[in-house]
Image (spheres, rainbow, N blue to C red):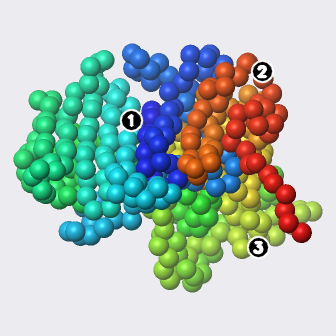
Amino acid sequence: MLLEFRVKNFRSFRDEAVLSLAASPDSTLESTHTREAGLEKVKRVLNAAAVYGANASGKSNIIRAFQFMQAMVTTSNQVQPDQENNLTPFRMRPDFDTKPTLFEATFIIDGRRYQYGFEQTRRRVISEWLLVYERAKPQVWFSRAYNEKKRSRYDYTYSDYFLGSKKVWENATRKETLFLTTAVQLNSEQLKPLYQQFSEDMAIFPEGGSIGFDFSARYAQDPKNLQRVVSLMTAADTGISSVSFAKRPGRQFQLNIASGLSDIRDAELDVPQFGHLAEGQQYEFDITDESAGTQILFNLAGPIFDILQRGRLLIVDELDRSLHPLLVQKILDMFNNPTTNPKGAQLIFSTHDVSLLEGHKLRRDQIWFTEKDAEQVSHLFPLLDFSPRKGEALEKGYLGGRYGGIPILGTVDR
């Protein structure tokens, strides 16, 4: 369960940005939109968070920051010695190009708070740390810092609570790689639950539903799962009454559900066929014959149900891409409903769908904004910074510019 995410000096975010899923003391929709955290200082955690903002304000860069951190944790050991990574620091100030970029994520795992982060440049990891909270005082399980005076050397500190072959892992960790990645690859059982938060429990879709149908097609091979997918398609009023599959040669999107990335290769595909009932007659349509919204909904259906069933984290850029506002609301409701979300799955998404701001679809602490200033620096801030009243017309306030996060429109030359 994600509690907080921090990033600094990444793409358009020059200064530190913090996205928190810790619920405020507000009791509104508490039983549906939040769940118990099991911590003394953080009582409840949000099931979902929505990020609003103008085009090019930084919404997508927050998603990319999650994706980069996930990729570093899961694949940093694949970076070759002295190979530069593809990190993109803030580019509007030349001096920030060589400054380190910070990533930090805080999770609740089995009732304990794990605060893990690192700083890095394109050429090396500068620092890395893991704090584990059993009680109020943290245990610094490990800390790693680049020593400028001793080139290519790092200073490590460890807690007595952190067990295993620490020196072996330390010696195997190159400057381009993370200690967490190396230790887990070399069988650290204590760090495995944290690593799995990135490798198995976090699904990131940086391009909305443009992920191909392959995962949903595989997911729906199980009859129970097929029934779930059909129920969502039917509830969305697509006119679809059944889903079947036809074997055909084509190009396969090999989706990694943890990262949201896909490779394309030639393969025999299970191509979805959608049944439409008209005057008692069933007509079959290929997925390519359906609307863009229907295709995206099917593509997202498998991952959404898989994430809800397993209590994972879904991060989607532009969830409302080609989807009707009522469909976006339906997906959000699935995460904000203890019946459909019994295991604590979470949803973070960017959107322009202002209809979600009204009608108790979101709590006030679930709403965030991004905005760029005159120096082209993106800022992330919560609606709560504006102390909105209960029952305040949030859609009207947002479109009226009260909270920021909207484009300042000028005139267009003729």
Residue 385 falls in image quadrant: top right
Disc 2 crowd rating (10 Å Cα; few below 14, some 14-19, many 20+) is few
Quarter containing the C terminus: bottom right
Name the residue that disc number 2 marks. Answer: 391
In 3D space, how far apart are the residues under numbered discs 2 and 3 (Cα atoms)? 43 Å
Q: Where is residue 289 drawn, in percent x and y?
A: 76, 73
Mark in front: 2 vs 3: 2
Label 1 vs 2, first from the N-terminus: 1
Disc 3 crowd rating (10 Å Cα; few below 14, some 14-19, many 20+) is few
Label 3 vs 1, first from the N-terminus: 1
Name the residue that disc number 1 marks. Answer: 106
Which residue occupies 70% across, 70% down? 287
Residue 312 in view of the camera: no
Which residue occupies 20% across, 34% down? 141
Q: Where is residue 25 drawn, in percent x and y?
A: 56, 16
Disc 2 and disc 3 in contact, CB within 8 angstroms? no
Please state which amino acid type lies under the numbered disc 2. Gly
In 3D space, how far apart are the residues under numbered discs 1 and 2 (Cα atoms)? 31 Å
- Reply above or below: 40 against 201: above
Q: Is residue 112 left or right of residue 165?
A: right
Q: What numbered label is drawn on residue 289?
A: 3
Q: Where is residue 167 drawn, in percent x and y?
A: 7, 47
Please state which amino acid type lies under the numbered disc 1. Thr
Disc 3 and disc 1 in contact, CB within 8 angstroms? no
